[in-house]
Amino acid sequence: MEKKTVVHQSADIISEGSLLKVDVKPELPTIESQEKSMEEFKIKIEKLKMMKEAGLLSDEKFAEEQAKLLSMI
């Protein structure tokens, strides 16, 4: 069996046309998935807040990232 490097694997994905291919199955959200989604959202908010307080984000970048998060809900 031939070992493929990441570059070879990436080239295969691109040549197969599966790079942007997404299998979408419509599913009704479950309570568990909604809870997980809400927990992930809370974690992202906390990380954003911590980065701002640590001085890692400018006011401009903070507002930009905040808007992205708010658009998710």
Image (cartoon, rainbow, N blue to C red):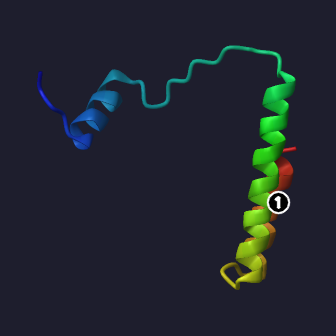
Q: List x then y, in percent, for residue 33.
A: 78, 29
Q: Residue at x 21, y 36 (%)?
A: 8
The answer to whether 52 appears left or right of 35 in the picture is left
Q: Residue at x 72, y 82 (%)?
A: 58
Q: Does 62 appear above or below 12?
A: below
The answer to whether 2 appears left or right of 30 in the picture is left
Q: Does 62 appear above or below 55?
A: above
Q: List x then y, in percent, for residue 56.
A: 66, 80
Q: Residue at x 27, y 28 (%)?
A: 12
Image quadrant assignment for residue 46: bottom right
Q: Does 73 appear above or below 43?
A: above
Image quadrant assignment for residue 25: top right
The answer to whether 43 appears left or right of 73 in the picture is left
Q: List x then y, in percent, for residue 64.
A: 76, 66
Image quarter where the N terminus lies is top left
Q: List x then y, in percent, for residue 24.
A: 64, 18
Q: Outermost residue, bottom direction?
A: 55
Q: Residue at x 34, y 31 (%)?
A: 14
Total tally of numbered discs in the picture: 1
Circle 1 residues within 10 Å: few <14, some 14–19, many ≥20: few
- The residue where tag 1 is placed is 67
Q: Outermost residue, left direction?
A: 2
Asked which secondary structure carries label 1, the reply is helix
Image quarter where the C terminus lies is top right
Q: Amino acid at mark 1?
A: Ala
